[in-house]
Amino acid sequence: MAGIKFQNVSFAYGEKQILRNFSLSVEDAQIMCLLGPSGCGKTTLMRCLLGLNRPSTGEIWVGDRCVFSKERRVNIPPERRGIGVVFQDYAVWPHMTVMENVCYPLKKQRLPRDAMEKKARYALEQVRMGDYAPYLPSQLSGGQQQRVAIARALVSSDEVIVMDEPITNLDAKLREEMLVEIRQIQKNIGTTILYITHDQEASLQLCDRMAIMDAGGGLCQIGTDEDIILRPADRFVFEFIGVSNFFTLTRSGGEWLFHNRSEWPYHGEVPAEFESAGQVDMGVRPNGIVFDDASPIRGTIRRSVFLGSEYNLFVSLNGQEGQGPVPSEIRVQRSAFEGTGSVREGTEVGLSFLSPKFYPVKEVA
């Protein structure tokens, strides 16, 4: 198998710089999910890896082979880089059978017909599509077409596969099934997968590690899903992954208060580094807010959405109109197994906060 390495890769469209000295390593036999907001350069990086874009600086390695180096004037053509690709729109040829689609990349390798079909049948068996070899894509479901696309990628390379939003066009149930199948295929074969997506939920279910890019094309954090969720490197990562609530606290009379709410003291610990500034932004996940009858911080449940295993609650903070750094409404998650009495719309609740994160006050544009 083979890992992937980007070293100081830069790329621009005209005067618009997309990537600047970007470096990232994907370990052998690992699924790395690359996440970031639209326009951050995820797809551009993928195209550089595949040889479809030519960087202005840096090197790209697949295993122990350099496929691009500006300094050494190396630029291996796309068809010789040995990388399988799965696109968002499947990109299966409608006039070809399943077998013909999977064999297509092998034709350029000029393999004997028997060897091509043997390799293609093995790949189809890996994605449970062996019985569909004579079918046309129009006779397949969306999930089956995506399996064909994965089989085609496997015959191109069982060492390195790039997946660009491969499950976006599938319905919710099929997305869940495909994530399980991709993970199982990777375990069976040991393929290194770079998974490009903006789907945070899919990344958390699938990846070994996640790499988070910011809007400027920079790399914010690399880590396991637990690292990213529980130990975000900065405020951008905290806000980008999952839902977050933010409150501004102000230091007054030796204690921290919710901004402009002297009757709402915050009794938790705030890092000492923020004392000199006198203000701090506190971020809390919806599942880090609990109901506490003794708390002076009061709110009213305005909307309750049942999601099967949990409730999504929209809680209006009493006496708060949303003018300023304390929001008028926050999101709270509550397990459905805790009982329904306390999640009825119109119920007043006290609020306490678990495992908050603290950041310098964000300037309002």
Image: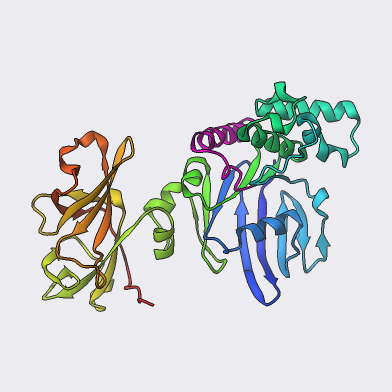
> How many numbered marks appear?
0
Q: Is residue 168 magenta?
A: yes
Nearer the observer, 304 or 255: 304
Residue 297 sits above or below residue 181 on the image:
below
Q: Is residue 28 visible?
A: no
The location of residue 4, given as percent across then percent down, is 67, 51
Q: Quadrant of residue 66?
A: bottom right
Residue 204, percent from left and from top: 47, 45
Residue 51: image x %, image y %? 76, 57
Q: How is the image coloured?
A: rainbow
Residue at the spot 91% in from the left edge and 31% down from the top edge: 112
- Compared across the picture, whether 326 is left or right of 20 comes to left
In the rendered image, which quarter contains the C terminus?
A: bottom left
Query: Which residues make up the magenta segment?
Result: 164-188
Chief secondary structure of the magenta portion: helix
**Residue 110 in which image quadrant:** top right
Q: Quadrant of the N terminus?
A: top right
Furthest-top residue in this view? 131
Is 131 placed above or below 141 here?
A: above
Residue 318 in sight from this viewpoint: yes
Q: Picture quarter containing residue 263?
A: bottom left
Point out residue 136 in the picture as x, y percentages from the top left corner.
Answer: 75, 30
The residue shown at (60%, 33%) is: 187
Please say whether residue 142 is one of the residues in the magenta stretch: no
- The residue at 57%/64% (across/down) is 40
Q: Is residue 216 above or below residue 195?
A: below
